[in-house]
Image (cartoon, helix red, strand yellow):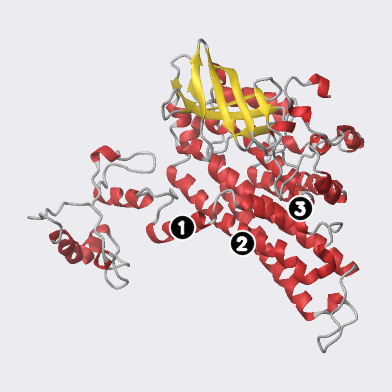
Amino acid sequence: MSAQLTSNAAARIATDPNVHDQYRSTWAEQPKKDGEWIQRAKDVAAVLAADAVQRDRENKSPRAEIALLKHSGLLKVLGSQRYGGGEQPWSVGNQVIREVARGDGYIGMLLGYHLLWSTIARVVGSPAQAERFEELIIANNYLVGGAVNPRDNDLTITRDGDGLVFEGFKFFNTGGVISDLTVLEGSYEGTSDHIFTVVKTDQPAIVFSHDWDNIGLRLTESGSVKINKVRVPWSDALGWDPVAKRPNASDLGVPFATLLLPTIQLVFSNLYLGIAWGALDTATTYTKKSTRAWPFGGDVKENASDEFYILSTYGNFLAHLRAATALADRAGHELTRVYGKASSLSDKNAVTAEDRGEVAEWVASIKVVATDVGLRVTSGVFEATGARATASKVGLDRFWRDIRTHTLHDPVAYKNRELGRYLLLGDVNGGNLTGEASISLAKLCYSNEGLSGNKGHDAKDTLYIRIPGDKAVIAKDGADWRACSTLSFMDSIEALGDELVAGLPGQVGCIRLNFTG
């Protein structure tokens, strides 16, 4: 296999992709219904779990494991049936990720990233590009990796004749070494415009550093990569007009094009939950077989499984994981609903900014919960398994190492703040912008203009005046919160508004505008 590659991807020792050849025939029939896809994921997880501890220790490039994924058909679960895919929604795709991660977090992560990147042309590309890349990926059963880490400097993109040239360095490139295709993204000729594209991984211009040596997710091949003048035709610039050489507003200027972020965050959340379930599975099996009852507690039990503190610990973990999983499934259904509003890729405008914003807050909620519960379970299982469970051969530590490594990629504190802004301010943008509170105000001030998340006044013709201090906060009894009309509500806060405006520097008067309620 090494001789067939033109890049340096094969420079690392890898597992033998032929060891799982038996599953090529065992899984020859592709699943059709959602339950069948989830069962296939469970079957894959069982195979991976059997030697996960050994593979973690050996730390070889996971070519055998990727071959197993390809035999299973799981790489195609979201793909169109026209090209041989399962055409399942993201709600099913995320359950598949979770189940695979339950057996092996490394491969669950690679599958999750693949499912995101394999659908990228649907989100930011034109309908024609979406069809072309989906056929390429699904019909060939390709694995897709990505060199798209937002914390790094952008790749630079320059125009070169009829094509584009990508160049730069990325510290993280998850799955790149064992992928067939790689997603690249960068800034175009020093402008604020960004371009996504999908390229063949096996080329001399993509040079892997083979430097991924972290405590967790060791088999994900997430090391750095040099992009050394990768050439791309304009027709592969996702969402761009290849003739006019500019972005298509209908593809990139709509809220639908921003769904990549909540989508990948939900992938992360299900990855964490899958790993946590795997830790609970492994720990309970160990406890039943090997954990000894504590002989000095005054209420000696014959079996560890009868110990009060062990039963309490496992029961608490089960309750939290079940609740988190239910929230993950709800967020998955919300995301599926939003994607479903643009069932035809020529109708991306059907997804509004409010749609995108609301689903992002569902995803932020599960990201917070999955992080907290995942870390708690994967570290806490040792309290119920005992000191001997820390032996390397048990491998119980790999679950915590995997979750801890990935949850540091973006601080969950920012998701907590985002949810706080959503709750208190009605903001579904999740950043420091004025956000959806502005939409509410705009609808109030310009009630006859049909304003929404897709239609509004630009920052250049809107003036916001922020008044600091406790007085500017409307108290619980400071307004008629049950007012049946806009005008009634305005009347209830008129005195407060007049007082605040009168206190502005240089204030000489106030004009009361006419609103329709």
Look at the numbered disc 2 and give the secondary structure of its residue.
Answer: helix
Disc 2 residue type? Asp
> Which of 516 and 356 lies nearest the eye of the viewer?
356
Q: Is residue 107 left or right of residue 363?
A: right
- Dot 1 or dot 2, earlier in sequence: 2
- Dot 1 or dot 3, earlier in sequence: 3
- How crowded is the residue under tag 2: few (<14 C-alpha within 10 Å), some, or many (20+)? some
Q: Quadrant of residue 86?
A: top right
In the rendered image, which quarter contains the N terminus? top right
- Residue 91 lies, in percent from the top left, at 65, 47
Residue drawn at (82%, 60%) of the image: 282
Q: Is residue 198 above or below residue 392?
A: above
Residue drawn at (45%, 22%) of the image: 189
- Residue 134 lies, in percent from the top left, at 65, 27
Query: What's the distance in space between the residues labelled 2 and 3, CA to CA?
Result: 17 Å
- Residue 24 lies, in percent from the top left, at 88, 33
- Dot 2 or dot 3, earlier in sequence: 3
Q: Is residue 448 left or right of residue 372?
A: left
Disc 1 residue type? Arg
Disc 3 residue type? Arg
- How crowded is the residue under tag 1: few (<14 C-alpha within 10 Å), some, or many (20+)? some
Residue pushed farthest bottom? 298
- Labelled disc at residue 417: 1
Mark 3 — residue?
A: 102
- Residue 491 lies, in percent from the top left, at 20, 63
* C-beta proximity under 8 Å, tags 2 and 3: no
* C-beta proximity under 8 Å, tags 1 and 2: no
- How crowded is the residue under tag 3: few (<14 C-alpha within 10 Å), some, or many (20+)? many
In the rendered image, which quarter contains the C terminus? bottom left
